[in-house]
Image (tube, rainbow, N blue to C red):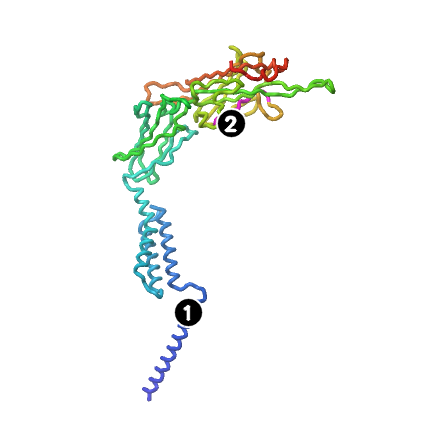
Amino acid sequence: MSGLLSKANAAEETVENEAKTEAVAEVLPAVQQGGGPDMPTILKTSGWVIIIIGGLLSLQGGSWGILVVLVVLVLGIGALFGGQALSEEGVNPTKMAIAGALAILLTAGPYAIGIFIGAPDTFAVAELEYDEEDNELSFKVLGGIDEATATINTISSTGVETEVWSGSKSLGDNGARFKIPIEDFFQGNSETCIYCSDTSLVVYQLVVDDGEGTSSTTDLSTGFTTREVLHAGVQIQDHMTTQNSGTGSAGSTTTVIDGLIIDVLAGVMPDDHEALDGGRHSMSTGEEDAGTLGIVNGDYTIELSVMKGTTNQWNHPTIAVDGYDASFNSNGEFKNGEMTTWLRMGGTETDENGILFLHEDDFYNGDGCYTFEVKIINSFYVDSVLDEDVDTDSILLESRMSWELQFDQYNNDDGGQSARTYDAC
């Protein structure tokens, strides 16, 4: 009797289990069709997310250990494998091999590249620049070498190579930065003129060596190593003022010349640069930029004087140039400009439009030939490798431009345009 009851209970349990199984089978597709991702998709997506995170960690190089990257790599591949195993088609060996290869490349690749770059016997020179504030050449050596030796050589126009500076530094995790004062290696301008055959050109080369036979050579920019002004020019234009006299029908209006507006240019120019008729200069090319005008990125002062014959009529306040920045005080005003083209000078009076000019009352002494003399004093960079030092401020350049000024003829005798031609004299 008990046996029959047991069989009946077992049969009943079997029927109940089959019913539950059928119910679950009906519910699962409904859940999956409701828009939510299934477990294989979740695992596959998670695997790729983990691998991408591993790639980002690998890009950080030494800040994350290789073990951390490998753990992330294993977790990512494992998630990809689990996703395929739970999918309907199962594990596809070809797809899994491709996914694994991509995972290794994405995660371990950047780390391997970082190790290669930092490996012994490899290095690079970076961030080569000129610090105008401190007047020094600056660059960084990066790589896996223990020590770097930097040398600066000059190469003359005849091919003679001369070492003018050398120094060594140990490399840390962030490399080593070299800072070399220009006075320690400067041997003269890389460019001494433009639009001409430059027979005194000096090429500066930076050579970095690892001491094991590997070196890197870079020609320094001529903008770094053309530091001294060798030429200066002046150009002028008249300043006109309208004057009223009398009243009513007896009144009249006249325009007179009451001064000059003066511009100065300093740099390296053709040796035959000169004053031209009309107050112009041969470097007034119409292409007013530093390249065509031979502007020098250096440190120097400019002194401008106006003379008639041998008599000094007026002196412009000294202009200080640092790099390209020029500054001076004129007529009680502080002026700031850039020597990247013609630099407008100061004066003794400011007109109603804010234009500063040199008034005729402050320099003019009758019609005649007036000379505009420019003195340039370069800050000479004393070369420590020379046997004898040269005092700073010892390089003096004088340049003179002369024009016929006929203010009196124009103003008093109505000389017309011919009195304003400013012929070179």
Q: Residues within 10 Å of mark 1 (few under 14, many from 20)?
A: few
Q: Are marks 2 and 1 in contact (CB under 8 Å)?
A: no
Q: Is residue 340 magenta?
A: yes
- Residue at the farthest left position: 212
Can you see residue 325?
Answer: no
Q: Relative to 90, is 122 above or below?
A: above
Residue shown at 37%/18% (left/top)? 390
Q: Nearer the viewer, residue 386 or 124?
A: 124
Residue shown at 35%/30% (left/top)? 219
Q: Measuring from the top left, give residue 269's x and y in whole percent.
A: 44, 22
Which residue is tagged 1?
Answer: 29
Q: Relative to 339, is 15 above or below?
A: below
The label shown at residue 337 is 2
- Residue at the farthest right position: 248
Q: CA distance from mark 2 to mark 1?
A: 78 Å
Q: Residues within 10 Å of mark 2 (few under 14, many from 20)?
A: some
Can you see residue 43?
Answer: yes
Of marks 2 and 1, the one in the foreground: 1
Q: Earlier in the sequence, mark 2 or mark 1?
A: 1
Q: Measuring from the top left, give residue 247's x and y in whole percent.
A: 73, 19
Q: Which image quadrant for residue 95?
A: bottom left
Which structural element holds mark 2?
Answer: strand
Q: Say what amino acid the circle numbered 2 marks.
A: Gly
The label shown at residue 360 is none
Q: Is residue 12 magenta?
A: no
Image: magenta residue range:
335-349
Q: Measuring from the top left, give residue 285's x and y in whole percent.
A: 48, 24
